[in-house]
Amino acid sequence: MQVVFFIFLFIVGACFGSFLCCEARRLHFKETQKSHKSLGRRSVCLNCKTKLKWYDNLPIVSWLMLKGKCRKCGKKIGTTEILSEIGMALAFLALGVTIDITIATPLEWSIFIMTLMLTLSLGFLAIYDGAYGELPSFCLTISIICAIIILLLKEWTLLLIGPFSPENILAPTLSVLILGGLYLVLYLISKGKWVGNGDWLLGTAIGLALMSPWLALITLFLSNFLACITMLPQKKGKRNRKIHFGPFMVAAFILTVSFADFLISML
């Protein structure tokens, strides 16, 4: 049963990855006042404007079958689509290990579903930031709201286990300060040169959802580690190119949440 659940999550994640990538492109075309009318609600080839058939719009499968090219004009589709689809599919699959569907309580299901919703919001931010170097404010707001709901659900779980403790407030506060607070300080000191204005809000959302200073530190380490690995293969002439940090923070969050127990045990 759990295996079927994993397969279901992988497929759903891939579908959402495709959807979020399309919506990110539509939003960018709209905000830059480009000819976004050609990007209707149906997916089209950005080169020849041909509306894609349903069988050319299957997440992951269609891209691989077409070898990343448009069926009609033969132009390359790009890698953003396939990376978004695979990324969200793996994110949903990884989060699936955090719940045992055979014994999960309604409260555990609520936390899991809200975590998936937060992941969708963060996924959109990662795609948009990676492609266009911006973090849309409306999606940052949605992420923070989802994170607050997750925080409240987790606090409720703790209260069901034992009495209220100052740790219930201290832990999430430190978590937010480590991620959101650090990036806010870096933003203010560098006047936006080191990190963007939205990075500290993204860090705040992630810190609220993690509600643990140790997990926040792990996420901070992983995000910087992933960013450094990505920068290493760059050619010397491109090393001054700005790296958008949002995708790495989101990827680190998914890894931390999915393997929290293992990561904590290594400390």
Image (cartoon, rainbow, N blue to C red):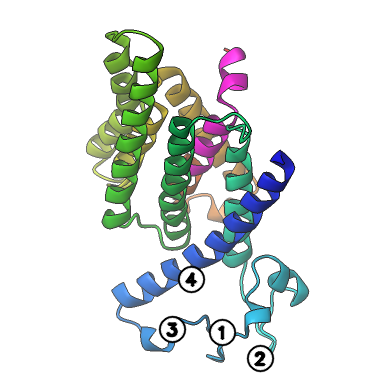
Tell me what residue is drawn at x 65 percent, y 57 percent.
Answer: 11
Residue pointed to by mark 4 = 22
**Mark sitting earlier along the chain (3/4):** 4
- The image's mark for residue 39 is 3
Say which quarter of the image contains residue 39.
Answer: bottom left
Residue pointed to by mark 1 = 45
C-alpha distance separating marks 1 and 4: 11 Å
- Identify the secondary structure beneath mark 3: loop
Instruction: Name the spot of residue 189 as percent of width and height, x first.
Output: 24, 34
Q: Amino acid at mark 4?
A: Cys
201 in relation to 128, above or below: above
Q: Please check the rendered image and state whether residue 38 is part of the magenta-colored stretch, yes or no.
A: no
Residue 235 in view of the camera: no
Q: Amino acid at mark 1?
A: Cys
238 in relation to 43, above or below: above
- Identify the secondary structure beneath mark 2: loop
Tell me what residue is drawn at x 39 percent, y 36 percent.
Answer: 206
Magenta residues span 250-266
**Mark sitting earlier along the chain (2/3):** 3
**Mark sitting earlier along the chain (2/1):** 1
Instruction: Name the spot of residue 225 as percent of width and height, x first.
Output: 56, 33
Q: Are marks 3 and 1 in contact (CB under 8 Å)?
A: no
**Mark sitting earlier along the chain (1/4):** 4
- The image's mark for residue 73 is 2
Q: Amino acid at mark 2?
A: Cys
C-alpha distance separating marks 3 and 4: 9 Å
C-alpha distance separating marks 2 and 4: 20 Å
Q: Mainly helix, strand or loop, the magenta region?
A: helix
